[in-house]
Amino acid sequence: MFNGVSFPNAEVVMIIGKKFILAAVFFLLSAGEVSAFAIIGDAGIKQAQEYGMMHYQEETAVFCKPWMVYEEKSDVLDDSSERAYIYTPYYLVAMNARDRLVGSQTINIEDGQAVMEGYQDSLPFCLVLFVKEGTNIQNRISASIRQNDKSVDSYASSLQELVVVKTKVIKETLPTLTPSEGKEKPDKDPVENEGKPVEPSDKDKPKPKDKTVAPGKGKSGESANKGKTSDKTTETGKAKPTGATGNAKEAEAAKPGEGSTAKPKTPEPIVIEKTVPALYRLQVFVYFDLRELDTNASSTLRVNIKGEDERNFHMKFSELL
């Protein structure tokens, strides 16, 4: 007896008659088609708990193997392959007993009943998949079970884990500034001065000279200038500031890059290396309404993830515990 649950007695088993053994085997085989998902009674709960306690030292992958199927395209059948775990009532009770034994907790019939009540009319699957893109994975995944011509969609899903298992190195080119983009902006916005005359500096201003007299308006003794225009007079009769004009032309010619055939040198692009995820391991639960499924029919669990190939897991529920 272990915390209210007895183990099989080896001596008693050895003296059981052959007829009883054959009858027991026949019963188990005939009941196998319905026992996988039926709400098991106290005797079934006790049997599942004993199974969990007898195998508690096994690794989880080994313990769960009777309820696991690999994806149809798997070449190597190990932890590197995609797989699905079917949570039958028997498996739920056995796993609960194993976990309680490992945690030094008591194990009784009520524990098994509580576990099954939480999953009544529900068939959960735990999927372990490997995906290339993990962004928004919860909304990209969908699952259905195909039975003959009937397809049943899952009614819920729950993401449990998303872990990077492989990375890759990529090269990325950083944006560079062209010579024109790298120039400093002037202190004043040129738009503010647009249309306004530029006042020459003091050195550019013309020095005071004798006033130039327009033709026909001179005083006596200036008749020599009649009919002539000063060489420093514009067509409208106004004088040009020669100093300002000359310096403006020199400044115009001194502007860099203008009037020259030499092109500015383009800066070399900057290339950096980044390490990014290349493969994720995804663990997600999907739930089906057991009342919509035929537990005696061959079934295919189909998993679709946007941007990925479809996954298919073939199983026969009647062969499960």
Image: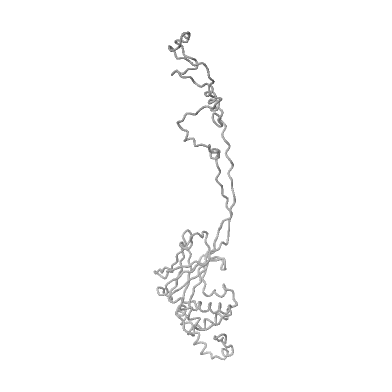
| Horizontal side, residue 63 vs residue 214: left or right | right
Provide residue 118's location: percent of width, then percent of height.
46, 76
- Work out whether 263 lies above or below 126: above
- Work out whether 258 lies above or below 318: above
Query: Total of numbered circles in the picture?
Result: 0
Provide residue 70's location: percent of width, then percent of height.
52, 69
Identify the residue at horizontal 53%, vertical 89% (top origin).
18
| Horizontal side, residue 137 vs residue 266: left or right | left
Provide residue 20's location: percent of width, then percent of height.
51, 89
Q: Quadrant of residue 8?
A: bottom right
Identify the residue at horizontal 57%, vertical 73% (top origin).
60
The scheme the figure's colours follow is one colour
Identify the residue at horizontal 56%, vertical 28% (top origin).
254
Provide residue 24's location: percent of width, then percent of height.
50, 86
Q: In which quarter of the image is residue 81?
A: bottom right
Between residues 249 and 135, which one lies in front from this camera angle? 249
- Work out whether 19 lies above or below 314: below
| Location of the N terminus (image quadrant) | bottom right
| Horizontal side, residue 148 vs residue 130: left or right | left
Between residues 143 and 284, which one lies in front from this camera angle? 284
